[in-house]
């Protein structure tokens, strides 16, 4: 069975909503702290917590309007409906925040399971932070995407991954069919991972239709091996 996992920020959405939030409501430290992550001094979760601490005095209703107005990548609504009609398992895996993913999906009338950091906007205009999907051995994400892929797929499944950035670099190593853009595209080239470049979800759907028709039980050997490795480690 094909299991489809999709990143959210700048993949489902056209913009990085994380950046939109902190540019409007946070302080420069929300972005500067990631230099410490790049140097290996802090984990992604630590940087997220510090970034969130810079947000205060936000009007929740104003923030909700900001989130609801975020445009989706062309073709995603149609892609989600295609998956539903074909009984394909579609899930969103994100290192973003529940605070904006939930209202964006609701505004677009999309009922898709999603896994992200449990970060919510409070009535006092601050952000509460909880990493309910963290994995102790993973420093790259607050919400471990690899753990989600393993938890929601079986050994015989074909894993499809669609993403664009740094937090997607681990899960593509264990995925059979990869759709990449922006930073993730370069990463796949460096690691020799076969990928399909994409600009919108009309392309993703068209290519997956071919896979389902021509290779209904497709698996990439190195990806399958990587999944087994992670299961053994955990």
Image (cartoon, helix red, strand yellow):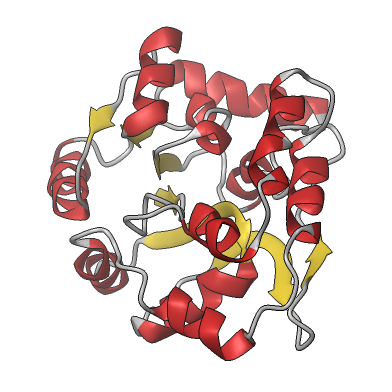
| Image position, residue 57 (x, y; %) | 73, 78
Identify the residue at image location x=20%, y=69%: 78
Identify the residue at image location x=21%, y=53%: 201
Q: Is residue 108 above or below residue 83?
A: below
**Of 165 and 16, the residue lying toward us:** 16
Q: Is residue 122 left or right of residue 107?
A: right
| Image position, residue 190 (x, y; %) | 42, 9
**Of 166 and 154, the residue lying toward us:** 166
Q: Is residue 48 left or right of residue 67?
A: right
**Of 21 and 4, the residue lying toward us:** 21
Q: Is residue 114 left or right of residue 14?
A: right
Q: Is residue 182 left or right of residue 103?
A: left
| Image position, residue 163 (x, y; %) | 41, 41
Quadrant assignment for the C terminus = top right
Q: Is residue 23 above or below residue 70?
A: above
Tell me which corner region of the image, top left, top right, bottom left or bottom right, holds residue 34.
Answer: top right
Q: Is residue 56 above or below residue 1?
A: below
| Image position, residue 102 (x, y; %) | 54, 76
**Of 109 and 19, the residue lying toward us:** 19
Tell me which corner region of the image, top left, top right, bottom left or bottom right, holds residue 231.
Answer: top right
Identify the residue at image location x=24%, y=30%: 196
């Amino acid at each position: 069975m094909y299991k489809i996992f999709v990143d959210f920020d700048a993949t489902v959405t056209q913009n990085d909503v994380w950046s939109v939030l902190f540019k409007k409501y946070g302080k420069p430290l929300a972005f500067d702290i990631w230099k410490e992550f790049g140097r290996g001094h802090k984990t992604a979760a630590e940087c997220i917590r510090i970034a969130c601490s810079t947000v205060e005095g936000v009007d929740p209703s104003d923030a909700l309007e900001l989130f609801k107005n975020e445009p989706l990548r062309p073709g995603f609504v149609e892609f989600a409906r295609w998956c539903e009609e074909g009984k394909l398992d579609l899930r969103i895996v994100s290192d973003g925040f529940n605070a904006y993913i939930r209202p964006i999906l609701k505004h677009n009338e999309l009922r898709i399971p999603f896994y992200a950091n449990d970060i919510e906007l409070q009535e006092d205009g601050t952000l509460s932070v909880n990493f309910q999907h963290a994995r102790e051995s993973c420093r790259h994400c607050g919400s471990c995407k690899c753990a989600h892929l393993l938890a929601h797929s079986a050994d015989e499944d074909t894993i499809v991954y669609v993403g664009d950035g740094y937090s997607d670099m681990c899960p593509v190593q264990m995925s059979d069919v990869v759709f990449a853009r922006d930073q993730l595209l370069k990463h796949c080239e460096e690691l020799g991972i076969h990928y399909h470049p994409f600009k919108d979800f009309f392309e993703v759907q068209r290519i997956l239709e071919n896979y389902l028709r021509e290779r209904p039980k497709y698996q990439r050997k190195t990806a399958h091996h990587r999944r087994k490795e992670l299961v053994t480690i955990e």
